[in-house]
Amino acid sequence: RHGITDWTGAKTGLKWKRNDKVLPSVNANHLPHDDYTLAEAMKDGGYKTFFAGKWHLGSKGSYPDDHGFEINKGGHHRGSPPGGFFSPYKNPVLEDGPVGESLPIRLAQETNKFIEANKDKQFLAYLSFYSVHGPIQTSPDLWAKYQKKATDRGLAKSRFKFDRTLPVRQVQDHPVYGGMMESMDTAVGLVLDKLEELGLADNTIVVFTGDNGSVSSGDAYSTSCLPLRGGKGRQWEGGTRVPYYIRVPGVTKPGSVVSTPASGIDFYPTLLDLIGLPIKEGKQVDGVSLAPVLSGNAIVKRDLFWHYPHYGNQGGEPSGVINTGSWKLIHYYEDGRDELYDITQDIGEQNDMATSKPEVVSTLRAKLNKWLKDTAAKIPQPDKRFNAEKKKGQLQSMKTKKLQSLERGHAGVLAPGWKPNKNWWSSVTTKD
């Protein structure tokens, strides 16, 4: 409803010049100021509010401190850290640290300073890591650690296979990506340790999740999401199914797992419910509170929807999705085709049942169409400039030259003596 259906700043309409069948729909370039955010609700409820890390929801005038966060460390218009993951950061709202300082560690330290300063107050500390995101960078010692681990396990002869639009990584043996993951894990540990140190662990709700699946295709092709199909930016489960950990003292049981489908739209009502703050009158909320589920109870069964009228850098295709918890329908805006999967039996989305289950397709398409209409979703329109023969050649190049190049390049990252700081796996700061 806020109009952001792709990363802010993405090209849309006739500005899109990549020879595709449809024109990506208009995309809002910032979070609307009349959207009443979680931070604003908690601030108005007496909480101190803090943001650190990746924002990517608008330029100056629509930064975190324009949407309810009293303190902002590092959140601006870019989705990638402009200076990479080591200081100097080249970030307009984060002071540089000593040369070579780790960005995730620094963000955790800034978060800890805020927590310590507000340990006797109610607070919201929103730590939004830039990790793991391009550019793919790590330290020489962490590269060496994960290069040895991959080598000791035995190196794969091949790492990629082609799926629809791009090669997709099948093996998790990227030592630079492994190093990035460890740095973020260490940073998370610093914050959890601070809560323990200050005696706050038993009355602080902790949530850990991701905004999308890992990059298995496109950008740096850095990891695999198997057994899920696809990854970040794609319409399959690898793009949308992410970890969601929540610890609510006195409510959740350590190690418990809940299979109830949930979505990012549920964070807002769930957290307000858990801390006893009401939903603002007149505020339209699409999600539901998961508080009953966390207590071992159930919520009303519902369908979940996605709408992505764009082309992703990672191979994603313009599509709408409905997930009922058992059936998942993907409707493609390019040509109107559908895919249908029973994700209770086929989590890897390999068996398309659209042809054999036309009645299910019809029912789910009707639900999806209604939701798209109710939310005034923008549907992409055909691009008259599209050249089918040229596209055929582009795909063939991806299947051959690109795939072969990736195999050579990623094998090189694991070669003894490779220098992670020399060319950062040929990685540069991405345009988003």
Image: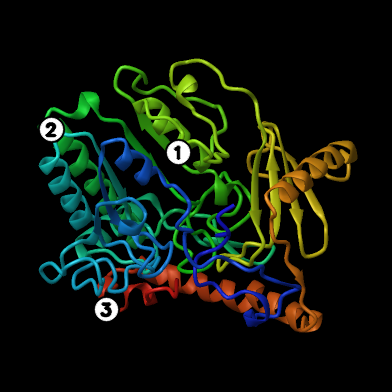
Q: Sequence-wise, which precedes: disc 3 or disc 2?
A: 2
Residue that carries the numbered disc 3 in the rendered image = 422
Q: Position of residue 22 (x, y in %)?
A: 74, 71
Q: Mark 2 belongs to which amino acid?
A: Asp
| Quarter of the C terminus within the rendering | bottom left
CA separation in Å, label 3 and label 1: 43 Å
Mark 3 lies on a secondary structure that is: helix
Residue at coordinates 13% horizontally, 72% vertically from top-left? Answer: 99
Q: Is residue 404 above or below residue 337?
A: below
Residue 112 found in image quarter: top left
Residue 340 vs residue 252: left or right?
A: right
Residue 268: which disc? 1
CB-based contact (under 8 Å), mark 3 and mark 1: no
Q: Mark 3 belongs to which amino acid?
A: Lys
Q: Nearer the viewer, mark 3 or mark 1?
A: 1
Q: Nearer the viewer, residue 299 or 427?
A: 299
Mark 2 lies on a secondary structure that is: loop
Q: Is residue 5 above or below residue 361?
A: below
Q: Mark 1 belongs to which amino acid?
A: Tyr
Q: Position of residue 208 (x, y in %)?
A: 36, 40
Residue that carries the numbered disc 2 in the rendered image = 120
